[in-house]
Amino acid sequence: RKGFVIAVDGPAASGKGTIARALAKHFGLPHMDTGLLYRAVALKIWRWGGDPNIEFEALRACDNLGFDPDDEELRSEPISRIASKISSYASVRDALLQRQRDFAAQEGGAVLDGRDIGTVIAPEADVKLFVTASAEVRAQRRVRELLERGMPGHYDDVLLDIRARDERDATREIAPLLQAQDADLLDTSDLTAEQAIAEAIRLVEHKL
Ligand code: C5P
């Protein structure tokens, strides 16, 4: 019997990463933060001094993509912006597709989080969660996260940035951010991380 796959999608700072990690730990499954792939491509272009507006350069950065998931630079604002830009290219999404599908297809199952896991990467996932929160709550979380990492973050700038990225992610032609028809919606606006995790576990257990 094939492994149990959990797809967690949602916008930036919705809590999807925290939830996906907690689910992976709780159910003993490997976890992939697929946003890191796009961030790794972005960081490579940034280090090269390349132009993210040139699709061909972004595609070239997908070759031999290796990265350190603990590299703080991957999470910085300039890299977030470049990642958002290059994730709109069909060629880039194609280049990163198989790696994500293979991860989802491993024998024991897996948890993946991103924007298009339930819709494109693993449409047959056993459980799909669509995690959201209001833009204001997400901006607050993001500011706190940046401060904790010792990086500057101003609420108004972060809120504008989140809104702009939401708009881009939702309106892009390829693999836009959208709730799969068969996904459960989990709004974390008024939940603590612990409450959101407990609710996610409950939703998954319901499908076991
Ligand atoms: O989730 P995270 O903020 O780390 O993702 C970085 C960028 O990568 C996002 O702006 C999003 O546009 C893109 N992304 C994507 N598809 C995914 C995961 C992330 O397009 N599955």
Image (cartoon, grey):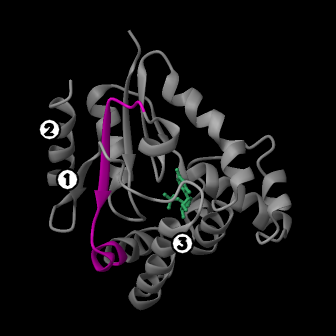
Alpha carbon of mark 2 to alpha carbon of mark 1: how far? Answer: 10 Å
What residue sits right under mark 1 in the picture? Answer: 196
Q: Earlier in the sequence, mark 2 or mark 1?
A: 1
Disc 3 crowd rating (10 Å Cα; few below 14, some 14-19, many 20+) is some
Cβ at disc 3 under 8 Å from ligand 1: yes
Alpha carbon of mark 1 to alpha carbon of mark 3: how far? Answer: 26 Å
Left or right, 173 with respect to 184, comes to right
Query: Is disc 1 placed on a helix, strand or loop?
Result: helix
Left or right, 48 with respect to 203, comes to right
Instruction: Examine the rendered structure and indicate whether residue 75 appears above or below residue 139.
Output: above
Q: Are marks 2 and 1 in contact (CB under 8 Å)?
A: no
Any mark on residue 202, and which? 2
Q: Are marks 3 and 2 in contact (CB under 8 Å)?
A: no
Residue appearing at x 65%, y 68% in the figure? 85
What residue sits right under mark 3 in the picture? Answer: 168
Q: Which amino acid, mark 3? A: Arg
Select label 1 or label 3 by which is in front: 3
**Residue 193's quadrant in the figure?**
bottom left
Q: Which amino acid, mark 2? A: Arg
Question: Quadrant where the C terminus lies?
Answer: top left
Residue appearing at x 38%, y 40% in the figure? 7
Any magenta on residue 204?
no
Left or right, 157 with respect to 127, comes to right
Extent of the magenta region: 124-139
Query: Is disc 2 placed on a helix, strand or loop?
Result: helix
Q: Earlier in the sequence, mark 1 or mark 3?
A: 3
Q: Nearer the viewer, residue 151 or 10?
A: 10
Q: Residue furthest bottom?
A: 156
Q: Which amino acid, mark 1? A: Ala
Instruction: Examine the rendered structure and indicate whether residue 149 appears above or below residue 104.
Output: below
Residue appearing at x 22%, y 61% in the figure? 188
Instruction: Examine the rendered structure and indicate whether residue 114 appears above or below residue 46.
Output: above
